[in-house]
Image (spheres, grey):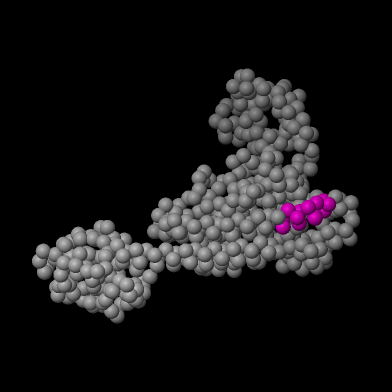
Amino acid sequence: MRISELLAVKRLHLRFVTGSEHADRVLRWAYTTDLLQPARYLRGGEFVLTGMMWRTRPEDSETFVSSVAGAGAVAIGAGTALGEVPADLVQACRDHDMPLVEVPPETSFGAVTEEVLRSLTQQRLSSIAETRDRHRRLMAEVAAGADLPPAFAQAAEQAGRTAWILSSTGRHVAASGEPLPRADREWLAARALTWTFFPHTVRLPEQEGRPLTVMPVQTKESHPLATWLLVCEGDHTAWTEEEHESVAELASIAVLARSRAEERALNDARHLEGLPRLLAAQRFDEVTELLRGTGAADGVDGAHVVVSAVMLPEPRVPDLARRVVAELVADHPGAAVTGDEDTLVVLPVGGWGPQARTRAEEFRATLVHRARILEGGLLDHRLALGLSSAVRGVPELRGAAVEARHARRLAELRGGRARVIAGAEIDSHELLLASVPEEVQSSYRDRLLGPLLAYDRDHRSELVQTLEQFLAHSGSWQRCAASMHVHVNTLRYRIGRVEELTGRDLSSLEHRVDLFLALKLRD
């Protein structure tokens, strides 16, 4: 409510004594006081009503007006029930550029306060109705498939908030203005995976004085590894009720958009669920038709890469592996993602040639980088990903899928919370190991190393470690003994026990290879 609007209410009979040039100032509240220094009870924006009981001498006017002005009040209303407005009060108001309004004896402070509250309440209700109407329109647009970034920016502008939506890997989704720097987005995403409660207030490393409130965009299928984050400027513990409501409106738009995105991704995955079978059967015409519409089939003579991924152990959350992998390959147009326990991705990397290989390498770097960001949330699982080399045309996708699966099995063997292996890396014995069924690997490893592990456990010895060191030093007695800080005779005794327990002769290259492979399967 403006001062001019209040003075326009005829039944109140209010008039300016001084400061009429500030008639457009906005009143936030009306407050009655007869304290000489009421500043500690003011929050700013008040119309301060006073009967001037605080005035015992002319100097008190300066003290009173100074306190009121310093607290951010917008005007003073002086009641004249006990006499005229003194000249010293008028002068003090002029000195502090504070509008002074005369409240005549026939007008009570209660009536003035009631009029201010009535006007503010009416404005508040009107604003709420307008805001809700705008929010409903935006929600309807998003539900109908409107692009999220402009809708979110409009909603944030209407709410008067600076806000961003990030993915679980720190990928920019939407913002009220400029995106956060990539380093800040990824820093927030990585740490959000380790937090146990929300909303969470945090300060960016490079901006210690700038608090941000982070909260997850919760949908029915939400999981920290594959969700969005709503980041709002400010500390939520200091927000007003109105500010909490405005953030809740932004969150509802983000939740609706996320639900729509998850629904589309699930439909695409179901559409593509026959892809692995068709590739294995070499039915490439059908593969091309299946991929059409995703963008992955665009330019069938161009280059593609294939990703094979698995989460271990199998997640209890349905479809989690596919959703996590979809996030890892997001921002790459045309990515076709399908499967759950064994997720497969076909992704175009452009025309054939050196540029395609370069783009494939860039994609691999992105995959590794994003997987590392997720490591903080992989407390109960491991994520293993295999990436094929770039291949030309749909007919070569079958071989690329086989290569990606071998690389993924090697990623499983190498361990780590999140491991990405490219097909170009598996040109050694590890390729053979990765292609062997897991039950065969376990049987082979246990048969050769089982007796040594049992002996070490029962005798607190170090036969397995000794074998590793001996093979690492290519069977050199002197170098191996020196590295282990033991006498050569001690080393000979231990190796003798290894040969006795395993039935292998370590002077034989063939037998050394057997034990070397068994050790690799144990890593």
State left or right for residue 251 relative to residue 522.
Answer: left
Work out whether residue 53 can be spotted.
yes
- Percent across and percent down for residue 327 are 65, 55
Quarter of the rendering occupied by the C terminus: top right
Furthest residue in direction top, as rendered: 458
- Percent across and percent down for residue 403 are 78, 51
Quarter of the image where one finds residue 90: bottom left
- Percent across and percent down for residue 2 are 36, 73
Quarter of the rendering occupied by the N terminus: bottom left
The span picked out in magenta is 264-276
Say which of 151 and 300 sits in front: 151
Q: Is residue 302 magenta?
A: no
Work out whether residue 489 can be spotted.
no
| Residue in view at x 40 percent, y 54 percent | 238
Rendered position, 442 above or below 155 = above
Quarter of the image where one finds residue 210: bottom left
Rendered position, 461 above or below 132 = above
Say which of 250 and 19 sits in front: 19
Furthest residue in direction left, as rendered: 57
Q: Is residue 274 magenta?
A: yes
State left or right for residue 445 relative to residue 78.
Answer: right
- Percent across and percent down for residue 203 are 44, 55
| Residue in view at x 59 percent, y 48 percent | 224
Quarter of the image where one finds residue 139: bottom right
| Residue in view at x 26 percent, y 68 percent | 107
Q: Give the dominant element type of the magenta stretch: helix, strand or loop.
A: helix
Say which of 397 and 225 sits in front: 225
Say which of 84 and 157 sits in front: 84
